[in-house]
Image (cartoon, grey):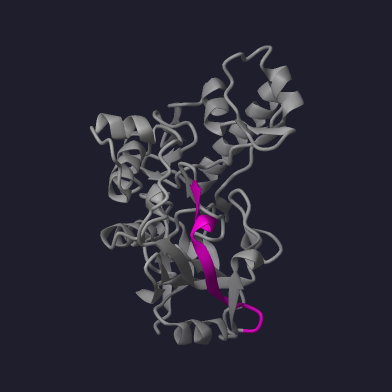
Amino acid sequence: MQIKKNISLKPFNTFGIDAKAKFFVSVESIDCLKQVLSLQDYPDKLILGGGSNMLLTKDFDGLVIHINLKGIDLLLENEDFVFVKAHAGENWHDFVLWCIDNDFGGVENLSLIPGNVGTAPIQNIGAYGVELKDTFESCEAISLKTNILQSFTKTDCNFGYRNSIFKQYAKGQFIITSVVFKLTKRNHKLNINYGTIASQLEFMQITNATIQDISKAVIAIRESKLPNPKEIGNSGSFFKNPVISKTHFNKLTKNFKDIPSYPVSDNDVKVPAGWLIEKAGFKGKRFGDYGVHKNQALVLVNYGNAKGSDILKLSKLIQKTIQRLFGISIEAEVNIL
């Protein structure tokens, strides 16, 4: 274990923000993690995974702990299902590709989502009609208070739309060290009726899709819409899609006849935040070194040397404008530090 001083966090966050950590350590085992957590000389600690769901707005005057736990283990299998344990430091997309290569189904729609396995349950990542909770079996996490490794079932995690206990009352209290997934070995349940997957498969001239085909289709769609963080700094979707009442929605249709929606319950609908932001005129708008991506209004970007505070300022301007134009409050999906 080596604690380094004055380290740039630019390589460790997908926004590419050049914030500094006064102290930094990368941990590669649970024993090492427990040891670091027990250090008394660093009362302020920041846990860092893949850095894909965070916006750094300032330097961190404490110890940044980079979770670098690696490994994918086959725990149990029968003719129909397999239980796979992936450690927290595994890159999420690499894990999905590993599943695809082994013909394990369930996560193919989640291809190319940035970040690591350990942070995926925190916000219950989702895309194209599939959420992490659909294949989630359990996870292990270390309590920051007791330094004890605990197990959490799906029920324990209380998953919701981009939500879990790790974003609510247990926020900042645990570090997820591994996740167990229940995946299909045959009779895969294919989800191709969300978004443009079906049309992309048709474009690819595929009629009897496999999980491999769906993964390729999702990758193609995401690459056409979303910037590569290695080329343009971003954290994917910056905002959650808001849920509003049908009464509110019906009032909006009087002035915005083309406003899209997706049913959530008998009384509520979900409205695409990207549509609201585009309608408000922000899509493709650039402010020096930062702005809104030209192909996807949900994505705020760092074109080079933007500060986290710049992107935060832009996000607040967007929120204020959406509230004024539509009477809708949109919530940031990323963690702002």
Please say whether residue 74 is visible from this viewpoint.
yes
Question: Which quadrant of the rendered structure holds the C terminus?
Answer: bottom right
Quadrant assignment, res 144 = bottom right
Magenta stretch contains residue 139:
yes
Question: Which quadrant of the rendered structure holds the N terminus?
Answer: bottom left
Nearer to us in this view, 334 or 272: 272
Query: Residue 251, how many percent across, how many down?
Result: 73, 18
- Give the side of residue 295 with respect to residue 58, left or right: left
Taking the spot 56% from the left edge, 75% from the top edge, the residue there is: 141
Quadrant assignment, res 18 = bottom left
Taking the spot 53% from the left edge, 71% from the top edge, the residue there is: 139
Please say whether residue 49 is visible from this viewpoint.
no
The relative height of residue 87 versus residue 94 in the rendered view (above or below) is: below
Magenta stretch?
130-146
Q: Exactly how many numbered labels are in the figure? A: 0
Taking the spot 30% from the left edge, 47% from the top edge, the residue there is: 210
- Give the side of residue 326 with respect to residue 77, left or right: right
The relative height of residue 96 versus residue 44 in the rendered view (above or below) is: above
Query: Residue 41, how many percent across, how many down?
Result: 57, 84
Magenta stretch contains residue 315:
no
Query: Residue 228, how many percent across, how many down?
Result: 33, 44
Nearer to us in this view, 29 or 263: 263
Query: Residue 73, how many percent across, how many down?
Result: 36, 75
